[in-house]
Amino acid sequence: MKNGKRIDDRLPNELRPIKFEVGALERADGSCYVEHGGNKIMAAVYGPRAVHPRHLQQANRAIIRYRYNMASFSVEERRRPGPDRRSVEISKVSRQAIDPVIIKEFYPRSTIDIFVEILQADAGTRSAGINAASVALADAGVPMRGLISSCAVGKVDDTVVLDLVKEEDNYGQADMPVAMDVRTGEVTLLQMDGHLTLDEFEQALELGKIGCASIADMQREALIQKYRGKEDE
Amino acid sequence: MMKQEKLDKTIVVPGDLLSEDATKAAEGTYVENGKVYSLTYGLADEKEKVRVIPLSGKYLPAIGDVVIGMVSDVSFSNWKVDINSPYEALMHISEYPRRIESSEMAKIMGVGDLAIFKVVDVDPSMKIELAPREGQLRVLRSGRVVEVSYTKVPRVIGRAGSMISLLKSKLDLNIFVGKNGRIWINGKAEDEDLAVKVIKRIEREAHTSGLTDRITKLLEEEKHGVHEKR
Amino acid sequence: MNDVIAEIKRDYIYELAKRSERADGRALDEYRPIQVEVGLIGKAEGSARVKVGNTQVLVGVKIQPGEPFPDTPDTGVIITNVELVPLASPSFEPGPPDENAIELARVVDRGVRESGAIDLSELTLPDGKVWLIFIDVHVLDHDGNLMDAAALGALAALVHATKPCERYGYGPDAPLPIKESPIAVTAVDLDGEIMLDPSLDEETIASSKLTVISGLQGALAGMQKSGTGTLSVEEIARIVKLASSKAMQIRDDLFGGSTDG
């Protein structure tokens, strides 16, 4: 960090440029393409639909499945396709970030499948994936108490910063992805890697809330624009 | 928060605050701490009650619904029917108007056949039972089926059936609209093509006003065009 | 349940085919609108997004130095993989590539390799290593005819690609040595009627499918028949002729005749 500006010239509390495109896919029930800094992510939702294999189904509610997957060409060194341990963990925490707001009781014996494909990765993929997934769920008409918004906060050069970029993620002192239902302030995802004092943690959480609130506005706007644009036809 | 023009129907997303009066809550909403919020991505409709009409989503059958289903399997005593829902429906052999043997089932309705059914039971675990709509089982052997989101069905039918009547008056064909978003049309090829075009347009513009007028205009224009082309 | 097509839809498509018509109004040899966009994935050395109608694939080409295969020390390596990720279709399940993914990958690979599109002997490096070229096809939306979209994406991504020589200390960056331009054209047989660029329904209903990959001079670089139906020799000859000329047309429209950059 130099003169209060970060490696990509941003201020500590500034998000990278973000773009949402709702309904980017034809076959999926709901979809959302997100560009967040250098991240390029496609999220899609299928469901509610029948569960196969049958033994996974729950008698009185839908199950939620979330699959975070990185394309081979999404990272610097070509990556072997398929889930690795990191993808499996991210899939789990992401699922648990969104599950709380979905009204699963409306759809017993079914599954709501969420697929997030990382087409290009540039730090903060799990957060960007969750943001895209929330919008895709809304696009699919899945009933939810609210949208989940996510961002990563971190510490670089002893400063708490919002939305780490790749270099900050690699060389920084802490990385803390957080997700929440902005309206209620309820946190649904919280992970921390690195070290923060209690004070720094509180700052980070506050910054995270602000970041998530901005993102919630963007998610909402993107969904409204999808139909707004059509009204002008 | 972004400001939005107030139309008589506003586009809302899950979690949007709709009203501070909990007694006004209706479909598509939930109540928390005395306030009403949207449950889905849809159009908020505020009259005496506040409800949200979804823009997308899966069809959930209710008793009494009349739907167009496709047979996906024939078992010993049931036809398994795909009704474009997360849930498969069954029509029991005993629902067929006359007594038949199990071996006759596939000939009456086999895999891939479409028919008009009535939903006679939906239990809490979403086990769905069908019966023929009334008396005779109507298997659709000709024509085409168009699929739209079930959320657009009311628009395809129109207020007091106005849209569907419009289509029937301008086009020479049979139309049947299933509650599950499947629409059967059967008539002259050009009229079927035009009907598909119109239905897809209604689906795209269902949330806008003045649609009936635009569709009337479209039908007039296309009908003249059709006669000139062929 | 997804694979069952309504009988009346099947009947309708066959009826139209008998009159040389198609459900979406296309001519029998007409393609849906093709869009090719290169460079979407900056991190990949080459990338292309191809849309054929609503079918959408994203191809990333990664180029890295590596060890050649022991029996061909002076030859670069091409590895092609196709991921039919579950978001692209209700019938795709998570997991390792199934027979469809593998078939797609191997046919795309054959097209690139057998056409001589890349001279592998030009991929050697001074220190005994060679360039490894990974062609990764990520299918995003399956609305029929993944083969042609994937093959086109692979070609476009390869043409767009740059060898990252500078990054590894091998001198200045340079494009790949592309010598040919293989284009895949897929046809289906619907009760004797041949149609190109099958839609999802046409593909599901057809008994046979034949993909023909041809190069700049119309020479054939690959073929693949799939499906449980049969094709007569005359039908095959007809398809090959149709496919070759259609490939020329597609190449002209998209690359202005050649792919020499």
Image (cartoon, rainbow, N blue to C red):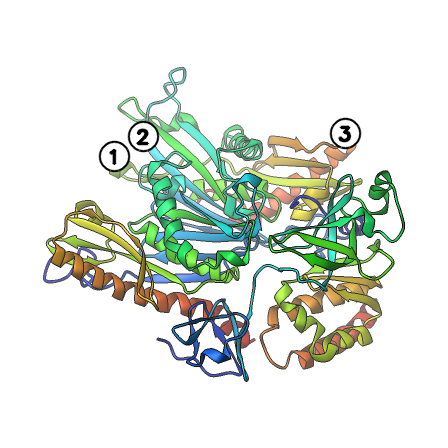
- Judging depth in this view, the residue of A48 and C136 nearest the camera is A48
Reply above or below: B15 against A152: below
The picture places residue B222, in percent across and down from the top left corner, at 75, 73
Q: How crowded is mark 3: few (under 14 residues within 10 Å), some or many (20 or more)?
A: few
- For label 1, the residue is C168
The picture places residue A221, in percent across and down from the top left corner, at 41, 70
What quarter of the picture does the N terminus of chain A occupy? bottom left
Residue C103 found in image quarter: top right
Left or right of residue C131, residue A21 in this image: right
The picture places residue A31, in percent across and down from the top left corner, at 49, 56
Whether residues under marks 2 and 1 lie with C-beta atoms below 8 angstroms apart, the answer is: yes
Q: How far apart are marks 3 and 1 (CA)?
A: 51 Å
Residue B15 found in image quarter: bottom left
- Whether labels 2 and 1 belong to a single chain: the reply is yes
- Judging depth in this view, the residue of C21 and A98 nearest the camera is A98
Q: Residue at x 28, y 60 (%)?
A: A16
Reply above or below: C200 against B153: above
- For label 3, the residue is C233
- Looking at the rendered structure, the secondary structure element under dot 1 is helix
Is residue C6 something one can see in this rendering?
no
- Looking at the rendered structure, the secondary structure element under dot 2 is strand
Q: Which residue is drawn at 17% across and 61% down?
A: A203
- For label 2, the residue is C65
The picture places residue B215, in percent across and down from the top left corner, at 70, 76
